[in-house]
Amino acid sequence: MKTLVYIICYLIYPFSFLVPRSKKQLAFGSYRGSFSDNSKYLFIYLVEHHPELQLCWLSMNRQTVQKVRTLGLPAYWVLSPIGVWRALRAKYWFVNSYSSDIMYCLSGGATIVNLWHGVGLKRCEFNIKDGTLAERFVKKTFRERFYHPESFKRPEYLASSTPFQSTMFASAFRIPLERCLGTGYPRNAILQKPKEEVLAFVRKYEPKETLQLIVRCSKYEKVYIYMPTWRDSQKNVFAQQMDLRVLSEVLKKQNAILLLKPHPNTIVDSIYQADNIVLVDRTVDIYGVLPFTDVLITDYSSILYDYILMLEKQVILYLYDYEEYVRDRDFYYPFAENVVGRQVKTFDDLVRVIDLQDYKMEEEDRKRILAKFWGNTKDKDSCKEIKEKVLC
């Protein structure tokens, strides 16, 4: 059945080049049919500031469509007649990963603007040398090409930050360096807004669960959040190398709470939860919550670079599987030279650092990493920049 669906897709794809596309029509989508990440924030910005444009959110998920419509925003199920038509008529497609964020077989002739999902060190796409994704990006097997055509369709533009990052992305996506926009990312604007503005945004555009989580966090003196990256092996990273019962007792002494936010791709089974240990619901957009946290616990995730844009925040890097991880996923740049934060490699050290609150960051280190990964883009209005550079 899956093969038949893909064959139909390939038959449809050439016809998507025949429909005249309008520069005034813009389509937006995100991975797994969600309403999320950079395309979400750019979409909301353009809806609010540019009524002259014809915008729509397209999704394979009917619940997502209903959710976006409830917010008073234009959205369509991409398989409906009007959804297909809007996808075919839109000259510009704004996505977070690939054209499959909307629908690959309708993308012929569209200008794909890949907003991606953050800066970082890990090799991605065609920079990958080995590991689980090598079949696709190194060996480029027929099976991978057949079932993942979106990975081989080059975007016309890619959102990036500094030349340091643009160089990496240009080779990863096999596009000219000048197509890397150097604008920063729309989702980061909310991290640098006053908390009153963040709350106003959350009340207007986020589900009630997000506001409830923020209110819950406000009852504690300190808020930690654990956001590890996705492992190619899809491990349950919370069940390994972390005794949440022990952490809970340490946090109680500080009147602190720990939020657990798995990567969307991570498999999560039953997790220990307590009053001060909370597994964040997948429906919650964590970017509206991050300004109300104090300490990020992460590993090799690009969330590190977004988080340090909030200058008063601290970071703990929990690197319990460093040697194993780098065997599966190599870094484009040396890891130690391009991260900031208190590094620990064992759970006992993690507990000790949290217990002593021994994680204050050297501000000179923060400034160095900010300059390298963000430069002056941290002060730009990325949504406005993208609009001006793409819709010229």
Image (cartoon, rainbow, N blue to C red):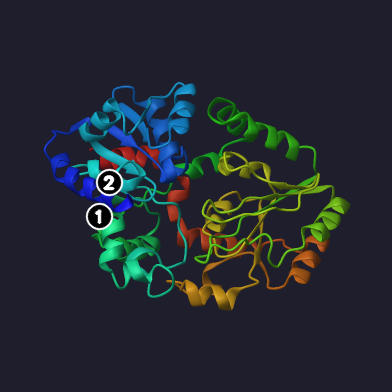
Q: Find out whether the residues at labels 2 and 1 contact each other: C-beta distance under 8 Å.
A: yes
Q: Residue farthest to the left?
A: 18
Residue topped by disc 2: 104
How far apart, in angstroms, are the residues tagged by discs 2 and 1?
A: 9 Å
User: What label does residue 390 carry, if any?
Assistant: none
Q: Which residue type carries mark 1?
A: Lys
Judge whether 70 appears above or below 348 on screen: above
User: Can you tell which quarter of the image residue 72 is in?
Assistant: top left
Q: Is residue 380 visible?
A: no
Q: Residue at the spot x=60%, y=48% of the render?
A: 310
User: Can you tell which quarter of the image residue 50 is in?
Assistant: top left
Query: Where is residue 114 drawn, in percent x and y?
Result: 33, 49
Q: Residue at the spot x=55%, y=25% of the render?
A: 204
Residue topped by disc 1: 153
Q: Residue farthest to the front?
A: 1
State the residue in front, 161 or 77: 77
State the residue in front, 58 or 316: 58
Q: Is 199 situated left or right of 89 in this image?
A: right
Query: Where is residue 117 drawn, in percent x and y?
Result: 44, 51
Q: Is residue 179 visible?
A: yes
Q: Which residue type carries mark 2?
A: Tyr
Comparing marks 2 and 1, which lies closer to the viewer?
Answer: 2
